[in-house]
Amino acid sequence: MIVSINQLVGEYSFPAIVLHPMNFKQFVQYIDPANKPSTKVASYMKDLELILNDDPNCYDLRIYDADYVIFRKKLASVTSKSIATITTTCPDCGAQIRTRISADDIKFRKLEDLPKSIVLSGKEYELEIPTVREFLLKTSNIISSDKSDIGIEIVKLMTLFKEREMSKVINIVNNATHEDIIKLMDLLEYTDSTLPIPVECSCKKEKGGNTVVSVSSLITDMFLDLYSNSIA
C-alpha cells in the first residue's frame, strides 16, 4: 500500500511511503506473548522497526508522521477496510468501550503546534519534532544514560529537545522542580501525536455528552485489539 506525503504533516523530498501488510506468519509472531517487549519503549521501537523494514524513507519521517504510518500498516494488515472496531478505556469511569473508528477519524497534530522553546531553570531550550533517525539516536543515548525503567512518554518528551547532549536533557527533566514541573507536564501533551477522539460512554449519557480518549496508546496494541474484536 502507498501512503502519500499529502497525508502527512511534514515536508519530504520523496513522494510516498510504501508499506507491506503483514502476512499470517508475521502477524502470529508479532502478537505471540513470548515476543512481547518488556517495556513500552521497546514496544514502540518494535513498531518503528515494522515500517523501517518496509521503506527506508521512514527514517526521515517526523515522529508524528511515523505514528500515522504505523497506524496505517497495522490497519491494512488485519482489514481491507478503512474502518475497524477497537476497545478503549473511558478516562472518566474506567469502563471498556467498543467503538468503530476509521482512518479518517485519527487526527494528528501539526508540527507547528509544538512550542518553539521552553524555559527551564532560567535557561531556554529549543524544541522540535525529531525525525525517526534522530529519535532512535536520542533514545539510545537516553536509555544508556538512564538505567531506570523510563516510560515512552518521558522518552518522547526528552527527544523534543534539540539539545545534542542528552545527558543535559535527562538531568534537567528528571530534576525539574516547582514551576518547571508544570511546564513539563504541559509539554507532555505534545508527546501524543494524535488528537483525542470523542466516544460514547454510559457515564456521560445522563449529561448528554461524549467523553474523549487518546488513541496513541491504541496504536501499540492495535493488532491484537482488532483481532479480538473481529472474532468477538
Image: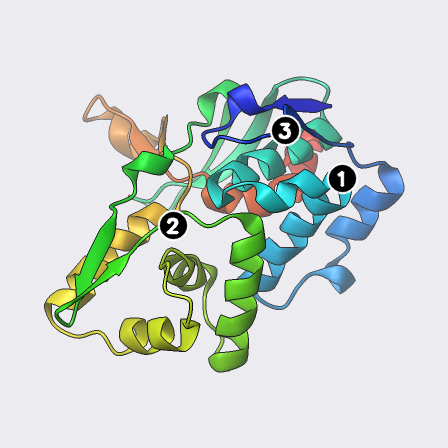
Up the image or down, 84 lies above or below 153; here it is above
Up the image or down, 97 lies above or below 41; here it is above
- Please identify the residue farthest to the front as the structure is shown: 13
Disc nearer the start of the sequence (2/1): 1
| Residue 82 drawn at (x, y percent) | 62, 19
Which residue is labeled 3 in the image? 14
Amino acid marked by disc 2 = Thr
Q: Dots 3 and 2: beta carbons under 8 Å?
A: no
Which residue is labeled 1 in the image? 54
Amino acid marked by disc 1 = Asp
* Viewer-nearest residue: 173 or 225: 173
Say whether residue 76 is left or right of residue 44.
Answer: right
Amino acid marked by disc 3 = Phe
In front of the other: label 2 or label 1?
1
Tell me the number on the disc at residue 191: 2
**Mark 2 to mark 1 CA distance (whole Å):** 24 Å
- Please identify the residue farthest to the right as the structure is shown: 25
Say whether residue 232 is left or right of residue 21.
Answer: left
* Quadrant of the drawing holding the N terminus: top right
Q: For the residue labelled by badge 3, is the local secondary structure a helix, a strand or a loop?
A: loop
Q: For the residue labelled by badge 2, is the local secondary structure a helix, a strand or a loop?
A: helix
